């Protein structure tokens, strides 16, 4: 498994063979997940497009052994966002993404991000407009800060992280629980096991940091501002039965982009689908991605 050092942290990644088509499709996973969940989509897309998937810092096999530098930007030069002292905000993960693209010599990419990965993709499009030609957010939206709801979400997330070892020791069939969590219909047990693996492997500092730093009132309210200023095309794919990121919140964020304002066609809602659209409905998601890319083919 190849890896690339980004500011002191080895990042695990997979890059399929080059194809005659541009751009490269870059897949960004969500919270407590890993690059593995993109495999069903990549199998369908890789014959046409080169595909890059990677583990975010602190997740999957991109494990933290020491704190990376908080303000480095590799050889990419200054980005369009201000530097930050936190290591786990979406804009810092977008910085990592830009360095990864530069090191792999990828100069033309569409970003496809799931949940938190969608937020990182939007930040990436803002920071590196010369590299990023478009964004597809899957099960990602928001831009409305509901104080009580976010406080409950953060509290539950913190407890999950704190009691991970105890939960896993006392629930021998935990993988079956994960096959039913946040999806419209149970997914294959192999995916339940993968979710357990990623749940365990996530570095506590990264798991907690991304949870807290991406859900502050400032960060949530900043998203619509970012979307409204993006020059690249941005599309949003929602699961009709997603209880984590309900379609109404996906449409809300999508509405700030010029594509929505002009024609309202930058949102796609998939029936019988929960929060893991790329695993639950890979054929449908792949078809939508092909349609979007063909619409913007140069």
Image (cartoon, grey):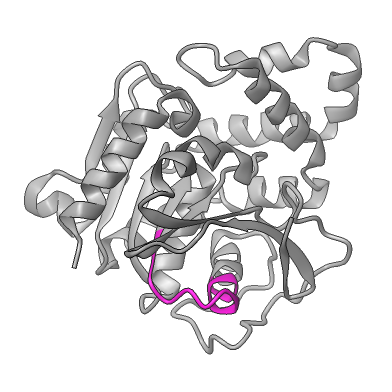
* Depicted 91 relative to depicted 148: above or below: below
Residue located farthest toward the left when viewing the structure as drawn: 263
Find residue 194 and report its horizontal and vertical position in percent: 70, 29
Find residue 188 and report its horizontal and vertical position in percent: 59, 17
102 part of magenta stretch: yes
Residue in the image at 54% along x and 12% along y = 186
Find residue 228 and report its horizontal and vertical position in percent: 26, 61
Looking at the figure, which quarter contains the C terminus?
A: bottom left
Visible residue check, residue 163: no
Residue 89 placement: quadrant: bottom right
* Depicted 233 relative to depicted 203: above or below: below
Part of the protein shown in magenta: 98-110
Considering depth in this image, is 266 or 154 the residue closer to the camera? Answer: 266
Residue 265 placement: quadrant: top left
* Depicted 55 relative to depicted 202: above or below: below
Looking at the figure, which quarter contains the N terminus?
A: bottom right
Visible residue check, residue 210: yes
Considering depth in this image, is 256 or 231 the residue closer to the camera? Answer: 231
95 part of magenta stretch: no
Residue in the image at 57% along x and 51% along y = 214
Considering depth in this image, is 246 or 110 the residue closer to the camera? Answer: 110
* Depicted 73 relative to depicted 217: above or below: below
Residue in the image at 20% along x and 62% along y = 297
């Amino acid at each position: 498994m190849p890896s690339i050092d980004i500011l002191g942290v080895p990042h695990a990644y997979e890059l399929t063979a080059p194809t005659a088509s541009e751009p490269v499709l870059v897949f960004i996973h969500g919270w407590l997940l890993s690059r593995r969940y993109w495999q069903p989509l990549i199998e369908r897309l890789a014959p046409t497009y080169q595909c890059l998937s990677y583990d975010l810092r602190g997740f999957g096999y991109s494990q933290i052994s020491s704190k990376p530098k908080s303000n480095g930007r590799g050889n990419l030069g200054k980005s369009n966002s201000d530097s930050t002292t936190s290591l786990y905000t979406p804009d810092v993960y977008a910085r990592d993404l830009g360095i990864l693209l530069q090191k792999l010599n990828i100069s033309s990419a569409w970003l496809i991000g799931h949940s938190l990965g969608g937020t990182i993709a939007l930040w990436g499009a803002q920071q590196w407009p010369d590299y990023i030609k478009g964004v597809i957010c899957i099960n990602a939206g928001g831009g409305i800060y509901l104080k009580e709801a976010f406080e409950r979400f953060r509290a539950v997330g913190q407890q999950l992280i704190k009691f991970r070892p105890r939960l896993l020791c006392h629930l021998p069939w935990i993988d079956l629980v994960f096959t039913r969590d946040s999806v419209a219909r149970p997914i294959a047990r192999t995916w339940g096991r993968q979710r357990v693996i990623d749940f365990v492997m996530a570095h506590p500092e990264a798991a907690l940091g991304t949870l807290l730093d991406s859900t502050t009132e400032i960060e949530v309210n900043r998203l619509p501002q970012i979307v409204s200023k993006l020059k690249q095309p941005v599309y949003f794919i929602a699961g009709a039965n997603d209880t984590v990121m309900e379609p109404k919140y996906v449409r809300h964020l999508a509405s700030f982009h010029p594509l929505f304002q002009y024609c309202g066609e930058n949102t796609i809602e998939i029936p019988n689908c929960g929060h893991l659209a790329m695993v639950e409905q890979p054929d449908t998601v792949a078809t939508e991605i092909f349609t979007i890319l063909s619409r913007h083919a140069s």
